[in-house]
Amino acid sequence: MTDFGLMLAGLARKKLRTILLLFAVFIAFLIYAVLAAFQSSLENATGPSSQNRLVSSNRINFTESLPIAYVNRVAQVEGVTDVSYSMWFGGYFQEERNFLLAFAVEPDSYTRIFSELNIDPAQRQAFVDGRDSILVGRQIADQYGWTLGQQIPVSSNIWRRQDGGNTWPVVVRAIFEGDGDTPTNSVYIPYEYFDEARAFAQDTIGNIHIKTASADLNDQVIREVDALFQNSRAETETVTEEAFNAAFIDQQGNLGLIILGVTGAAFVTILLIVGNAMAGAIRERTGEIAVMKTLGFTSPRIARIVIGETVMLALIGGLIGLAAAFGIVTLGQTVGSQFLVFFGSLKITPEIVATAVGLMVALGLITGAIPAWNAMRVNVITAFRRI
């Protein structure tokens, strides 16, 4: 019989024990893969960052507003080549559960700075020219079946209109496709159309988006912009777009720490369970190991067979866990897309799979090390005396 066959025979020796161990490994990697998919999608939710783009927001918190008059002053700073602005809209479609990642923006400059949105030129112009237009991401358009020229109601759970309502009727003038890395789960309405109708906080914005001539000028521009509004009623904090995106992600919670804690606890538990089970299995097979050594099996070969069992156990349970996680993530994208609006494309990436497989192998090697060492130390004469 081959070594592989002996590994399978060892796992099949006590089927119930093997099934329970496989289930423990399965649960650990199911949890890991699902949480890692959420972390990966959240990190990519804001899209790629440009090295020469900055974001200026209120120093207190980026949820506080700034006067729109700041935009023209920022545009005069040396090293600034383009500037735009945005305001969080907090929108939904028809029902509050149909949440939209919605912003009010200056259409021309915003789409010029964020060229990675990948908008058809004719549609972009229609969005810029249309007073009541809306720019929609492909994911959202497909989710709700929106088409170009369709009028839709976009409501806000933050802003009220002067007429007492909270709905802005808009027409789909453009659909952006993204560039592969850019998520398409957001929508944009013209700031002027939004601002003239809202009942309070008019002429205020949330963030100023700045494009610099070169990333080398970022520090200089940051200092000069923040110096412009020092000691004002609304001081600014200007950071790189990458830093701003990281801060936005941190607002959603430290998912990386959660993953580390949950999976770490699961792996330590499984190490103890599998290690103890395999050590017991080796004690049960002392006589068999003695016979194998009598037949010419070397200690290193026996150790390889024992470690092979634990690695195989970890791989089988882990791969089943990954497959189940893939199904859950796919189902979540289809059924629960309205609840995942803050996330980018939720998927099990190749990086997650590669890391998981590495953890499976490590788990198998670690849990098999002590049982393999015990198997190598089995003395043939002593073992036969115990039989």
Image (cartoon, grey):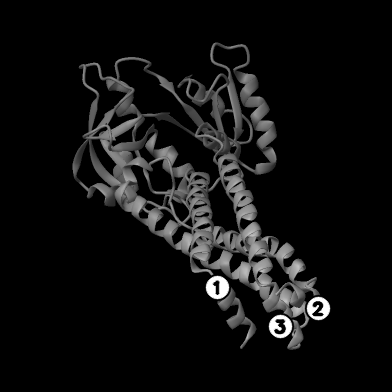
Tell me the number on the disc at residue 68.
Answer: none
Residue 234 horizontal side relative to residue 152, left or right = right
Gap between marks 3 and 2 measured at Cα: 13 Å
Residue behind mark 3: 292
Residue behind mark 2: 381
**Disc 2 to disc 1: CB gap under 8 Å:** no
Q: Which SS class for mark 3?
A: helix
Residue 136 horizontal side relative to residue 44, left or right = left
Residue 68 horizontal side relative to residue 223, left or right = left
Is residue 220 visible to us here?
yes
Quadrant hosting residue 4: bottom right
Q: Position of residue 84 (x, y in %)?
A: 47, 33
Q: What amino acid is at disc 1?
A: Arg
Q: Which SS class for mark 2?
A: helix
Q: Earlier in the sequence, mark 3 or mark 2?
A: 3
Q: Position of residue 249 (x, y in %)?
A: 53, 37
In this view, 154 is above or below 21: above
Q: Residues within 10 Å of mark 1 (few under 14, many from 20)?
A: few
In the image, 77 versus 134, the foreground residue is 134
Residue behind mark 1: 13
Gap between marks 1 and 3 measured at Cα: 16 Å
Q: Residues within 10 Å of mark 2 (few under 14, many from 20)?
A: few
In this view, 275 is above or below 169: below
Is residue 136 visible to us here?
no
Q: Which SS class for mark 1?
A: loop
**Picture quarter with the N terminus:** bottom right
In this view, 14 is above or below 128: below
Q: Nearer the viewer, mark 3 or mark 2?
A: 2
Quadrant hosting residue 13: bottom right
Q: Earlier in the sequence, mark 1 or mark 3?
A: 1
In the image, 386 versus 230, the foreground residue is 386
